[in-house]
Amino acid sequence: QVQVAESGGASVQVGGSLRLTCTASGYTYDSYCMGWFRQTPGTEREGVAAIADDSRTAYAESVKGRFTISHDDTKKTLYLQMNNLEPEDTATYYCAVELFSPRCKTHIGALRSMPTKSYFSFWGQGTQVTVSS
């Protein structure tokens, strides 16, 4: 069973930076999609950034130019570098993993758009990010 765990959430001031980390275990496959989503109370979980095993990435429009997703294959660790944070970035951030998903990779690579949450099967418990002015 794939296990996913996020860390790195914190309270920061507007304009600050944070790096979220996600570790995934319980699988040995090289074919994957991974992503970061966020959610605030009473709203739908929205996609932030995603990366496929060919290193192609996709971002939500609201974070382009500020957030960077990356993956360390040797450590099976996913990162989200968040710069120039805004109060609107306040949310619980979730890491998501999907294995053997050609459609997810096509979405990221060909469409260059963020896959929805339905593309992912394995989720972490979330880490809170709070941005205050």
Image (cartoon, rainbow, N blue to C red):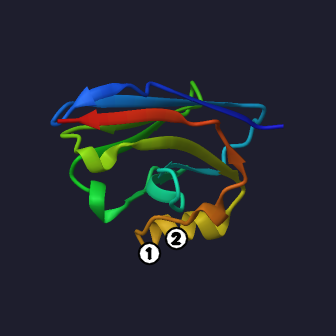
**Label 2 vs label 1: CA separation?**
5 Å
103 left or right of 50?
right
Which residue type carries mark 1?
Answer: Leu
Which residue type carries mark 2?
Answer: His
Using the rendered view, name the quadrant where residue 94 is placed: top right
Question: 52 or 62: nearer the eye?
Answer: 62
Residue of label 1 = 111
Local packing at callout 2 (Cα closer than 10 Å; few below 14, some 14-19, many 20+) is many
Residue 28 image position (x, y, % from top left): 75, 36
> Is residue 127 in view from this perspective?
yes
Image position of 32 with respect to 79: above or below: below
> Is residue 72 in view from this perspective?
no
Query: Which residue appears at 68% of the width and 61% of the height?
Result: 101
Among all residues in the image, which is located at the extreme front?
A: 42
Residue 16 image position (x, y, % from top left): 20, 31
Query: Which residue appears at 29% of the width and 50% of the height?
Result: 88
Give the structural element (helix, strand or loop) at label 2. Answer: helix
The mark tally for this picture is: 2
Residue 123 image position (x, y, % from top left): 67, 44
Residue of label 2 = 107
Question: 40 or 95: nearer the eye?
Answer: 40
| Marks 2 & 1, CB-CB < 8 Å contact | yes
Image position of 117 with respect to 78: above or below: below
Give the structural element (helix, strand or loop) at label 1. Answer: loop
Image position of 74 with respect to 112: above or below: above
